[in-house]
Amino acid sequence: MKFDTYLFGSIEVSPEKIINFPKGLVGFEQCTRFILAHEEVGDQPASYTLQSLDEPALALQIVDPATLGFNYELNLTEDENALLGAPSLQDVVVMQVLFKQEEGGKVTITPSLRAPLVINTKERVGLQKVMENLRSNIVLSNLSSPV
């Protein structure tokens, strides 16, 4: 199938590469079909582009939280677990959405800590886990600069 995208132009996507987010993402509930795109650099890319197949202009940069020194321990509800297809632990990845903030002429890239993506890689289905409160089970490690 061919899809037109803002960042990548017209791309060919095989149906088995599509990741479904049945409830969409926060602010983009109407967008339920996505693909992962990344540059072919080395064995494992540091970040991915989550490209919507429903809205060509929607492309989000996502990363594995471990690359930023975060470790999530998430408790899924029964409904969330069912939506993901009751996956085994090895079939699940957690990713963070990055967003750009501009303040005082300075631009920073910040991860969305309160709303990670949880994806069943085997069934290719995901959800955005919105957390009301950040809990102490988020661990920071590998900080590169002294505090």
Image: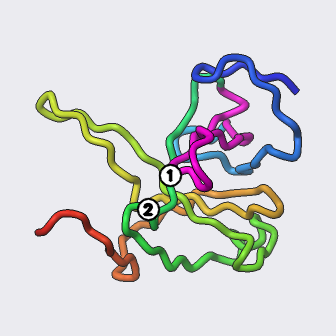
Q: Nearer the viewer, residue 8 or 18?
A: 8
Q: Nearer the viewer, residue 61 or 143?
A: 143
Apparent side of residue 143 relative to residue 63 in the rendered image (left or right)? left
Pointer 2 or 1: first along the chain: 1
Residue identified by numbered label 1: 46
Asked whether residue 137 appears in the rendered view, the answer is yes
Residue in the image at 41% along x and 66% along y? 132
Tag 2 and tag 1, C-beta contact below 8 Å? yes
Q: Quadrant of residue 131?
A: bottom left
Q: 57 above or below 49?
A: above
Is residue 50 part of the magenta span, yes or no?
yes
Q: Which residues are magenta?
A: 31-55
Quarter of the image where the C terminus is located: bottom left
Q: Quadrant of the N terminus?
A: top right
In the depicted structure, whether residue 31 falls above or below residue 70: above
Q: Which mark is residue 12?
A: none
Residue under pointer 2: 67
- Residue 50 visible to an observer of this rendering: no
Q: Residue at x 88, y 40 (%)?
A: 15
Quadrant of residue 58 within the rendered picture: top right
